[in-house]
Image (cartoon, helix red, strand yellow):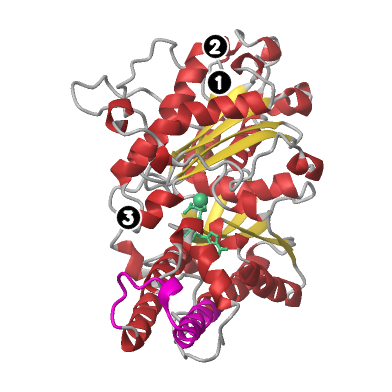
Amino acid sequence: MASSTLTSPLWLSRSAFLLKTSLLPSGTRALTRGFTGPRQPPTSFSPLSLKPSFKHLSAIPSASGILAQKSSDLERSFAREDVVILGIETSCDDTAAAVVRGNGEILSQVVSSQADLLSRYGGVAPKMAEEAHSLVIDQVVQQTLDNANLTEKNLSAVAVTIGPGLSLCLRVGVCKARRIAGNFSLPIIGIHHMEAHALVARLVEKDLQFPFLALLISGGHNLLILAHGLGHYVQLGTTIDDAIGEAYDKTARWLGLDMRKGGGPALEELAREGDANSIKFSIPMRQHKDCNFSYAGLKTQVRMAIESKILSIENNSISSTSSQERRFRADIAASFQRVAVLHLEERCERAIEWAMKIEPSVKCLVVSGGVASNQYVRTRLNHVVEKNGLQLVCPPPSLCTDNGVMVAWTGIEHFLCGRFDPPPRADEPEDSMFDLRPRWPLGEEHSQGKSEARSLKRARVHPSLTSIIQGSAQQQV
Ligand code: KG4
Ligand code: ZN
């Protein structure tokens, strides 16, 4: 990432642009696209297909005469700087968009957060989150284009997150992306949210080559992956229950922290005041010699510790407590954080061992996802990585939490390899059913990484991104 771009006035940080969804006019339901009534047959939307129908693309001025070539020639044919992609992200509670140039220059980005809703209702309620996305999506995309001084006509393609995430929320972003792509004859690229978290590191660190190891830590996911190449990932470990971000959020709520700035950041701040060794929580899964994670047990330990001292975990705002009580809460925050992160450290140590056996050329550990914006996490993981002779690559906090840049950039990576879908029909009905992928693994599990505990939860899981891409590649040969 060109750091000059980040400081450009066109770039809006998450905090600089908070469209307060709670302050938007009432009657929001009227603006929400409905899901009742007869549906059109599913619209074919095969993200990352390897053989796009090039005839559709001749309508795009910047691509004419070029896209008829073999996809592997695309990157050589395009000047990277000529490629400009709009990325749209609505998989969870942030409505985000960005315009990024093929060389990694961020032309603009806008994030509208639902932090207020989260703080009021204690979590993401899918229907409410969908309404909040629907209310702001047009404004977010328009502002993104305006800030970049561009119109849709200047775009080469539109990239949009199609999974994993909440279907209702994903649908808002996908509808918007398909409307733009249909109206302006633009190719469309379906993006895997977790791949985007990982690949944004290659925008930040231009020298970051495959293969690399990645720890992706967010509100819904805890993944350790070995990235062999674009679209080719092996999953070394995942969580058997909760993700670390969920544990941060719950602990912050139980400690009565101000959730408007996000549970994770609030807890990180309070933990600085506490003694991390004061409460002895046990480190999860030590008896399992693999790279999987578990945070449900730690959450229970924390809850019990809080309830042993504080009468209620509801309505117990920290702002109205004594300094002694605040100190106790800070000790819990610090002790929780120490153990939560120790669990990450131990799993990363093992993953590095495994990775060096599978791919001895691995040089970097990428750490990304919302929790990677935590300074304590970054410092601790840096020790692990240095000890093992590797390098830590951690995007800046604004690119670790959900954002449109990571979606646009991942779109660029795939687009330049010829993986995209043709423009949708301009008259595509609003109530079309799209191929959304709420549960969508990134890669196949490494044989040593399988966990019995998780195998029970595999119903209705979409084939992994890696298997789709590898399968298409084999069909092409
Ligand atoms: O990647 P992300 O923005 O959204 C998801 O894909 O889930 O991650 C959100 C998670 C939330 O659980 C949030 O509390 C956590 O990342 N988070 C943090 C910090 N900033 C965000 N956790 C700990 N410390 C932080 N500074
Ligand atoms: Zn995320």
Q: Give amino acid for label 1.
A: Pro
Q: Which residue is denoted by mark 3 in the rendering? A: 121
Q: Give the range drawn in magenta.
A: 311-339
Q: Give amino acid for label 3.
A: Tyr
Q: Between 355 and 160, which is closer to the camera in this rendering?
A: 160
Q: Which residue is denoted by mark 2 in the rendering? A: 56
Q: Which residue lies furthest to the left in this view?
A: 37
Above or below, 251 relative to 102? below
Return the x and y of residue 99 as percentages of the image width and height: 64, 31
- Disc 3 C-beta below 8 A from ligand 1: no
Q: Nearer the viewer, mark 3 or mark 1?
A: 3
Q: Are marks 2 and 1 in contact (CB under 8 Å)?
A: yes
Q: Nearer the viewer, mark 2 or mark 1?
A: 1
Q: Which residue is denoted by mark 1 in the rendering? A: 187
Q: Is residue 337 magenta?
A: yes
Q: Is residue 249 left or right of residue 62?
A: left
Q: Residues within 10 Å of mark 2 (few under 14, many from 20)?
A: some
* Secondary structure found at label 3: helix
Label 2 or label 3, whichever comes before in sequence order: 2
